Image: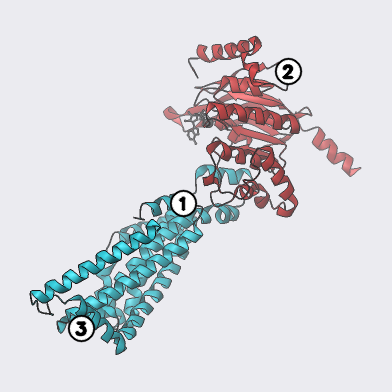
Chain colours: A cyan, B red
Amino acid sequence: MNSGFMKIVFSVLILCALLLAWQFAVRYNEIPIYLIPAPSDVIMALVRGFQTGIYTKHIIATLTEVFAGFSIGLAMALVLGLLIALNRTVETYVYPYIIMFQSMPKVALAPVLVIWFGLGMTSKIVTVALITFFPILVNTIVGLRSADFDRINLMRSLGASRWQVFRMLQLPGALPFIVAGIEVGIIMSLLGAIVAEFVGAEAGLGMLIQSMNTTLDVAGQFSILIILSVIGLSMNKTVGFIGDRLLFWDSSRKAKAAMGRR
Amino acid sequence: MTVQLVQTRFAEPAGNSSGEAIGIRRLSRRFGAGDQQIVALDDISLSVKEGEFVAIVGPSGCGKTTLLKILAGLDRPSEGEAWLRGTPIAGPRRDIGVVFQSPVLFPWRTVLDNVLLPVDVQKLGRSRCMDRANALIEMVGLSGFGNRYPSELSGGMQQRVGLARALIHEPAMLLMDEPFGALDALTRENMNLELQRIWLETRRTVVFITHSISEAIFLADRVLVMTPRPGKVQIELEIDLPRQRELSVMNSAAFGEYANRIRGILNAKGAVD
Ligand SMILES: Nc1ncnc2c1ncn2[C@@H]1O[C@H](COP(=O)(O)OP(=O)(O)OP(=O)(O)O)[C@@H](O)[C@H]1O
Ligand SMILES: [Mg+2]
């Protein structure tokens, strides 16, 4: 038996034991379902939600917001990052404001954005874009600047043009930073979408949690937390997977992965 | 007739005798201004013949790297002039190979791709240079490692990749800044033997900077001894030891004699290695 397989079996067993204990404790103590639901209640809510098609509809709404917002935030961060890193003038006028905005929690803007862009998807997409924009932007700038002085000198000594220095040195060198920014951004994007939906929305998992709260449907809320974990985990794994393929040469990334990545 | 004229112009560069690879006249380099001004190089004049192996020794901060950067076209003198092969240095040139103190490899490129970097930058055509790249990789003892990435190599192996890279575009001249400074003594001696072998095969002009007196004597035709504050060349020492030199030459009386003279000059200037 290999130890990796045994580890999985073991953790599944532990999970089952915990769920059983939870189920038993709730039922035995007759805790009402609107306080703490038993695992079976949560599973029932999950099944019902998908059978009626309600969950699917809201999952699609939230995922649309996340991907649209994330793509916009990513594209804008890369473009502006390039401009700032490569152009002194843009840098002197723009960078101070970016640093200022970076330390501000962007979710706090969600209520204002709902006022500006309405209850529909637009306000969520803007929130998500804003929230993913900053970590990727800052990492892009830092990454493009991180080119080691010796390497720049080497390129210059070979008579490289500025464009060659950018393409052959700065851009590949910035990739680990950009990927790290994306890894942070993708997690934040889900957070941003949910919070924005809390503030006021027509659809989405955040809105669903909110409306379940008013009917004391705690089992339903738990079932949506499970869905959110699955979504968050798969986004994280996907980005990590692509990053590992892209950055196979980056030994510090391997070290990070060995330590369980952050 | 025109060909004749052009050749004459290159053969007789202003104020330079032919066969001179590097000419430096009354060159100074100062950093900063006022009280905090540092004179990195002070009124240096020297000349290196085509095909000559010159070593520069001196303690930390005496301006060795500054001098090399000026020769590589990466820095400009405050005063004075420098020529390479008859033309004043006006910026980086493509007929120079530079080896830095650290390997300076690109971790996302394989060993082969790192060696081919100058080919990519100077658009020399990969297919044309592939055989040469593989031959160089073999020459520095890395055959079979062409498809590995730098993180899979030891420090000494990485440094040898840097050496192969500096030779790929067939530069007329090699500038080396303490290339083996970070290696252990044993690897360093091997690299010295290897470098001598490569030099005997190719006979390129080499300027080799080092902290190590024995490394300088072992490798060079001529050793320049520099002292700091301000950076000056104190003496030039012709090393009259027969080639090909073996490591055992370091135990010879002549070798000890050279080493003592160099050490004496450095000690007299209060600049102990
Ligand atoms: N860009 C710079 N700006 C200011 N001072 C500099 C700069 N480059 C070098 N110097 C100064 O010039 C002097 C010579 O520096 P250099 O790097 O040439 O020394 P070195 O002989 O190569 O030393 P080492 O053996 O430690 O590499 C030092 O005092 C250094 O502080
Ligand atoms: Mg130096």
The residue that disc 1 covers is A145
Identify the residue at image location x=69%, y=38%: B139
| A216 or B67: nearer the viewer | A216
Q: CA distance from mark 3 to mark 1?
A: 47 Å
Contact, CB < 8 Å: mark 2 with mark 1? Answer: no
User: In the visual, does B39 lie left or right of B10?
Assistant: left
Q: Position of residue B235 (x, y in %)?
A: 62, 16
> x%, y% of residue A169?
55, 52
* Residue drawn where x is 52% and y is 55% of the image: A172
Question: Looking at the picture, do discs 3 and 1 lie on one chain?
Answer: yes
Q: Are marks 3 and 2 on the same chain?
A: no
Tell me the distance, in whole angstroms, between the alpha carbons under discs 3 and 2.
91 Å
How many other residues sit within 10 Å of disc 1, few (<14), some (14-19) or many (≥20)? Answer: some
> Residue type at mark 1?
Arg
Q: Which mark is residue B242?
A: 2
The residue closer to the viewer here, B53 or A77, is: B53
Q: Tell me the quarter of the image containing the N terminus of chain A.
A: bottom left
Mark 2 nearby-residue class (10 Å; few <14, some 14–19, many ≥20):
few
Where disc 3 sits, the SS reads helix
Q: Which residue sits at x=67%, y=35%?
A: B174
Find out whether the residues at labels 3 and 2 contact each other: C-beta distance under 8 Å: no
At label 3, the amino acid type is: Ser
Q: Hey, what amino acid is under mark 2?
A: Pro
Quadrant occupied by the C terminus of chain A:
bottom left
Q: Position of residue B231 (x, y in %)?
A: 54, 23
Which x, y percent locates residue A71? 43, 72
- Label 2 marks which chain's residue? B
Q: Are marks 3 and 1 in contact (CB under 8 Å)?
A: no
Label 3 belongs to which residue? A211
Farthest residue in the right direction? B1
